Image: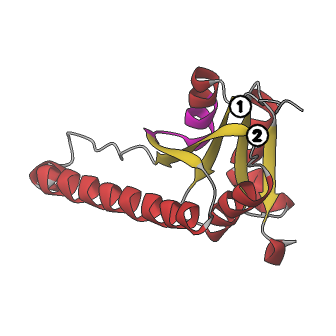
Amino acid sequence: MEAVKVEKKDCKIVVAVDESEESMYALSWCLSNLISQTTINNIVLLYVKPPPPVYSSLDVAGYIFWGDVVRALEAYGNDLVKSVMGRAEDICGKFRIDVNVERMVGSGDAKDVICNIVDRLKPDTLVMGSHGYGFFKRALLGSVSDHCAKHVKCPVVIVKHPEKI
């Protein structure tokens, strides 16, 4: 009997990560439930830095400290990116699976950046955690996952942390 050769296809999954436990749980869930042995698994870890604050040139104190403030904020943002990506890569390393991990960092409003990058990358799936905000908090702050679920052109998996259900 002749062996059947199964050809592997590529699968690209974008996982939106941030500082929250919810996003790290979503990444773990993705690695446990969406990774297949019959595909070449590509995970894109996407982190979105908030947009830098805008200072008025008329503010004398802001003008005097402008360079120091900008450098401090950039350093903090870079440290945050390293921390979040490090945690995410540690989670990926705990799973004994064949997966290619790529880092991607955007800057701006999270919902817009995620939608634009997903539109550009055309992944098979977008995975996001849910902060589990109630109605009023979600109405006030908006929900990144709700916005992305309505606007991206690929399947979206919104993973709720079991402690937040």
Image spot of residue 71 (x, y percent) = 18, 53
Q: Please identify the quarter of the rendering in which residue 22 is found.
A: bottom right
Residue 143 visible: no
Q: Which circle marks residue 8 in the picture?
A: 1
Q: Is residue 78 above or below residue 116?
A: below
Q: Is residue 97 left or right of residue 109?
A: right
Which residue is at a point 50% across and 48% down the rendered structure image? 47
Q: Quadrant of residue 1?
A: top right
Q: Residue furthest front?
A: 1
Q: Which residues are magenta?
A: 106-115
31 vs 162: above or below = above
Residue tagged by mark 2?
Answer: 38
Q: Residue at x 73, y 49 (%)?
A: 35
Q: Tell me which label, 2 or 1, sits earlier in the chain.
A: 1
Tell me which amino acid carries mark 1: Lys
Q: Position of residue 117 (x, y in %)?
A: 56, 29
- SS of the residue at dot 2? loop
Residue at point 72% right, 47% down? 127
Q: Is residue 17 left or right of residue 38?
A: left
Q: Nearer the viewer, residue 36 or 154?
A: 36
Indicate how the structure is coloured in the image: secondary structure
Under circle 1, the secondary element is loop
Q: Residue 149's x, y, as percent?
A: 79, 37
